[in-house]
Image (cartoon, rainbow, N blue to C red):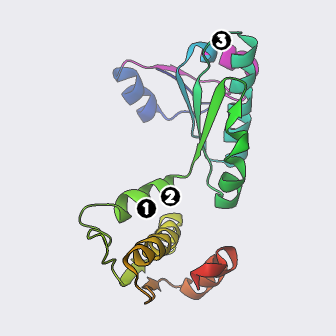
Amino acid sequence: MTCVDVAPSADHVAATRSSGAIVLRRDATSRTMLERAGVHRARHVVCACPDDATNTRIAATVALVAHAALRAEAPTVYVKVVDLDLMHGLQGRLATVGLTRLHFFNPAVLWSGLLLDNDNGPFERPGSPASKISVIGSSPLAQAIVVGAARRWHHAGRAAGLERRARITVVAPEAQRLIATLQRRYARLA
């Protein structure tokens, strides 16, 4: 494993190196740097910088490097995208560039799925989805739980022939603003 970070913390460098990985203090958006790091030989590349623009730029550069290497196999690239609208827009037909496969992911959506699909979660009994869920907070994870719970309720309720609506309560200082934003983004959420 090779990690490329323009400013890694000393703690992360020590922990990463102790697991046998190579840590390079370089700019991962540089094509030259990615070529030197051997990205064209990688099976998997994870772009997990703090901002979406940097992650998508790195992913595009990885695809260029892999294409130029003329190998029969290219890496699968996992791209962290925080902006949900951008993530949904990037999925689909853009998911492959040459031989490079791109997978866009949002950590909050992944975690909410794990929480909601847990055996002890609100949808543990098929056919009888939970009708009341409380979400405390307004973080991206809280927002993903609200949207994920509503989707699961819709699908589970339809499958079971239930007409009643789920009640999702959000407790946060800015709860009204959050709900208004989510309802604008997801019209059927109301």
The residue where tag 1 is placed is: 112
Which amino acid type corresponds to the residue marked 1 in the rendered image? Ser
Q: Quadrant of residue 103?
A: top right
Q: Does 4 sit left or right of 52 as displayed? A: left
Q: How far across and how far down the image is residue 17, in percent?
A: 40, 21
> Are the residues flagged by discs 1 and 2 in contact, CB closer than 8 Å?
yes
Which residue is pictured at 62% across the width and 77% down the height? 182
Which-is-in-front pick, marks 1 and 3? 1
**Residue that badge 3 annotates:** 36
Which mark is first along the chain, 2 or 3?
Answer: 3
Question: How many numbered callouts?
Answer: 3
How far apart marks 3 and 2 lie (CA) works out to 33 Å
Residue that badge 2 annotates: 109
- Report crowding for label 2: few under 14, some 14 to 19, many 20 or more residues within 10 A (C-alpha): many
> In the rendered view, would you say 160 is above or below 24?
below
Q: Residue at x 48, y 68 (%)?
A: 148
Q: Quadrant of the C terminus?
A: bottom right
Q: Residue at x 26, y 70 (%)?
A: 125
Residue 106 visible: yes
Give the vertical position of 35 relative to 159 (above or below): above
Indicate the amino acid at tag 3.
Arg
Using the rendered view, name the quadrant where residue 67 is placed. top right
The span picked out in magenta is 20-38
